[in-house]
C-alpha cells in the first residue's frame, strides 16, 4: 500500500452517527485509512482533540451587489479566510441575479469574483429575481444540469420579491429539473404596511425593524411557501427560521408527510430583539439589523427545541456583512439609514463565529450532542445540497476536510481577533467554550489557531441532486 501523506493521530473522531478514538490517514487529499497506529510522512498529534468533518456553511453572502449604494464588507478572499479560521472547509455563497440580467451572465460574473481567491471550497446557490421565459425555459434548466442544483427565492424586498404566480412557475421548473428551492419567507405586503405605520408614528430607530418584520409576517409567508410547494409536490428549504410561529408551520407540514426542510442561524440563539435597542434606543442597534430579526426568549427556547428534535436540518450563518462605518457612507451608519430603520443595510456577519457559538451554547452546555452538532453544521448541508459523501463525512474515500477542536478551550469573541471584512461583530464579548484549532482542506492546513493560511487553495464544486429528492424519508442525519 502506498504510504500515507498525513496521519492525524489519537483524536476522537466524531461523525453525525458516532464517535470513537482513531487515527485518520490521508493520501492525495482524501481519507485513505481510519484505524490504529497508522504511520505517514507527516503526523499531527490530536490527543485530547475532537476530529470533526470540516464545517459547511450553506448560507453565505459574499461580494453581492446592493441597490442602495452600500457595499458588502467581504469579498471572496476575506470571506473565505474568515470561514477557514472558524473551522469551515466549504461555503455556499449566492450568485444574485439582478432584474433584467441573464442568469448565465450572473453566474459567470460570480466566478470571476471568486476564481483564485478562495481559501475554502465554494459552490454557488443561485438567486432568482427575474423568472423570465428565457430564464425558466432555458437558462435555469441548463445551469441545474451544470451542477448549480439549488437556488433561492424571496417573498420580500422590493428588488427581489416574487409574487405567488412567479413562485409557482419557479417551483414547477425546480420540480422538473430536481433542483432544491430555498425560500426567504417573510410577507412583503405585511412588512411594508407595518413600516409605513411605524414611520407615521415617528418610530424610526433600528429597534423598530424588528416590529416591522413581525413574526406573524414570517409565519404567514412560511405557510404560503409550504402550500405552494405542496401544490407542486416539491421539496423546499425554509431558510433562517427565527422563532416559534414559523417553526410550527414547518412541523405542521412535516406531520403531513411534506418534504419541508428548515435552517436556523446563530442570531436566533445568541441575540434577542432587545439587542436592536442599542444603548437607549440609539443607532447602535443597527449593528443587529437582519431579516428575519432576532426574536424574544420564548423563540430562543423554541429554536433550541427544534435543533434537538430534528425540526432543523441546517445551522448556517446567513453571513451578510456590512461595515458599520463604511467609507463614503457605504456602511450601516449612513445618512439615509439614520432617517429610518427601513434603509439600514440588512444583514450581520457570522461565518467565522457560527461553529464556536453553536458548539459552546449547544454541546458545551449540554443542549445538543456532538453528533447533532456535526449533522447540523456539516453532514446535513452536504446531503441536502448535493455534496455528500465527498464532503460532510469522515470515511475512506471522502475529501480530507477536517477540523480539529479543542472542546475545553474558552475564549471571548472579539472583533480584534476576527478575520472578516467587517468593523464589528454582533457577538462582541460572548464567552465560548470549544474552539477550532486546526482546519484542513483536503489534508492541507488552511487555518491554525484561528489564523488563516496566506495562500488560497479552495476550488469550485459542481453539485449533484439533493437527497431531498430521495423517494423515502428525509435522507438526512436524524438526531440521535
Image (cartoon, rainbow, N blue to C red):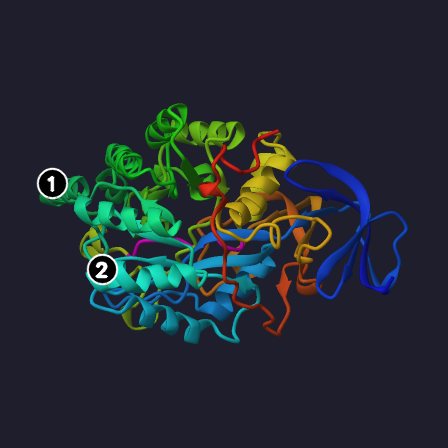
Query: What kind of secondary structure does the magenta stretch mostly adopt?
Result: loop
Q: Where's the C terminus, which quadrant?
A: top right
Indicate which disc residue 130 carries. Answer: 2
Which quadrant does the N terminus fall into? bottom right
Chain part drawn in magenta: 345-352
Disc 1 versus disc 2: distance between alpha carbons? 29 Å
Badge 2 marks a residue whose secondary structure is: loop
Q: Is residue 36 visible?
A: yes
Residue nearest the viewer, comparing 130 with 282? 130
Q: Position of residue 166 (x, y in %)?
A: 20, 50
Classify residue 70 by image quadrant.
Answer: bottom left
Residue 300 picture quarter: top left
Secondary structure of residue under mark 1:
helix
Relative placement, left or right, of 143 versus 220 is right
10 Å crowding of disc 2: few (<14), some (14-19), many (20+): many
Using the image as rendered, state which of residue 285 and residue 356 is in the foreground.
Answer: 356
Relative image position of residue 403 (x, y in whole percent): 67, 53
Q: Is residue 57 magenta?
A: no
**Residue 209 coordinates in the image, percent (x, y):** 25, 44
Tell me whether circle 1 and circle 2 mark residues in contact (CB < 8 Å): no
254 relative position to 117: left or right: left
> Vertically, is 148 above or below 156?
below
* Front residue of this view, candidates 358 and 95: 95
- Indicate which label's residue lies in the foreground, 1 or 2: 2
For residue 197, the mark is 1
Q: Residue at x 26, y 60 (%)?
A: 137
Eyeballing the image, is 464 above or below 251?
below
Amino acid at each position: 500500500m502506498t504510504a500515507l501523506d498525513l496521519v492525524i493521530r489519537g483524536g476522537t473522531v466524531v461523525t453525525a452517527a458516532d464517535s470513537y478514538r482513531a487515527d485518520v490517514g490521508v493520501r492525495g487529499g482524501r481519507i485513505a485509512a481510519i484505524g490504529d497506529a497508522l504511520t505517514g510522512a507527516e503526523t499531527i498529534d490530536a490527543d485530547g482533540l475532537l476530529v470533526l468533518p470540516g464545517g459547511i456553511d450553506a448560507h453565505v453572502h459574499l461580494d453581492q451587489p446592493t441597490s442602495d449604494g452600500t457595499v458588502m464588507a467581504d469579498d471572496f478572499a476575506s470571506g473565505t479566510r474568515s470561514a477557514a479560521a472558524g473551522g469551515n472547509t466549504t461555503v455556499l455563497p449566492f450568485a444574485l441575479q439582478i432584474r433584467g440580467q441573464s442568469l448565465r451572465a450572473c453566474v459567470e460574473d460570480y466566478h470571476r469574483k471568486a476564481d483564485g481567491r478562495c481559501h475554502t471550497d465554494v459552490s454557488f446557490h443561485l438567486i432568482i429575481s427575474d423568472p423570465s421565459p428565457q430564464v425558466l425555459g432555458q437558462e435555469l434548466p441548463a445551469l441545474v444540469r451544470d451542477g448549480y442544483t439549488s437556488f433561492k427565492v424571496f417573498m420580500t424586498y422590493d428588488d427581489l420579491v416574487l409574487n405567488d404566480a412567479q413562485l409557482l412557475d419557479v417551483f414547477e421548473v425546480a420540480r422538473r429539473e430536481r433542483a432544491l428551492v430555498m425560500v426567504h419567507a417573510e410577507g412583503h405586503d405585511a412588512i411594508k404596511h407595518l413600516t409605513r405605520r411605524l414611520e407615521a408614528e415617528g418610530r424610526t430607530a433600528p429597534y423598530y425593524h424588528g416590529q416591522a418584520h413581525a413574526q406573524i409576517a414570517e409565519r404567514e409567508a412560511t405557510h404560503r411557501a409550504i402550500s405552494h410547494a405542496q401544490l407542486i409536490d416539491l421539496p423546499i428549504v425554509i431558510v433562517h427560521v427565527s422563532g416559534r410561529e414559523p417553526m410550527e408551520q414547518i412541523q405542521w407540514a412535516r406531520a403531513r408527510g411534506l418534504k419541508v426542510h428548515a435552517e436556523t442561524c446563530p442570531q436566533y440563539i445568541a441575540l434577542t430583539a432587545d439587542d436592536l435597542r442599542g444603548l437607549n434606543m440609539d443607532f447602535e442597534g443597527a449593528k443587529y439589523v437582519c431579516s428575519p430579526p432576532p426574536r424574544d426568549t420564548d423563540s430562543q427556547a423554541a429554536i433550541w427545541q427544534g435543533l434537538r428534535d430534528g425540526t432543523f436540518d441546517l445551522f448556517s450563518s446567513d453571513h451578510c456583512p456590512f461595515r458599520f462605518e463604511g467609507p463614503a457612507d457605504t456602511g450601516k451608519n449612513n445618512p439615509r439609514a439614520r432617517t429610518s430603520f427601513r434603509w439600514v443595510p440588512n444583514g450581520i456577519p457570522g461565518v467565522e463565529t457560527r461553529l464556536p457559538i453553536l458548539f459552546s451554547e449547544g454541546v458545551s452546555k449540554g443542549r445538543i450532542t456532538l453528533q447533532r452538532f456535526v449533522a447540523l453544521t456539516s453532514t446535513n448541508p452536504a446531503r441536502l445540497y448535493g455534496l455528500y459523501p465527498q464532503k460532510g463525512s469522515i470515511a475512506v474515500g471522502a475529501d480530507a476536510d477536517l477540523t480539529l477542536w479543542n472542546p475545553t478551550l474558552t475564549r471571548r469573541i472579539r472583533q480584534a481577533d476576527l478575520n472578516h471584512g467587517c468593523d464589528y461583530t454582533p457577538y462582541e464579548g460572548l464567552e465560548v467554550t470549544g474552539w477550532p484549532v486546526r482546519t484542513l482542506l483536503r489534508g492541507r492546513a488552511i487555518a491554525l489557531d484561528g489564523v488563516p493560511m496566506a495562500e488560497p487553495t479552495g476550488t469550485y464544486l459542481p453539485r449533484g441532486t439533493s437527497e431531498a429528492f430521495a423517494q423515502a424519508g428525509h435522507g438526512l442525519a436524524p438526531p440521535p
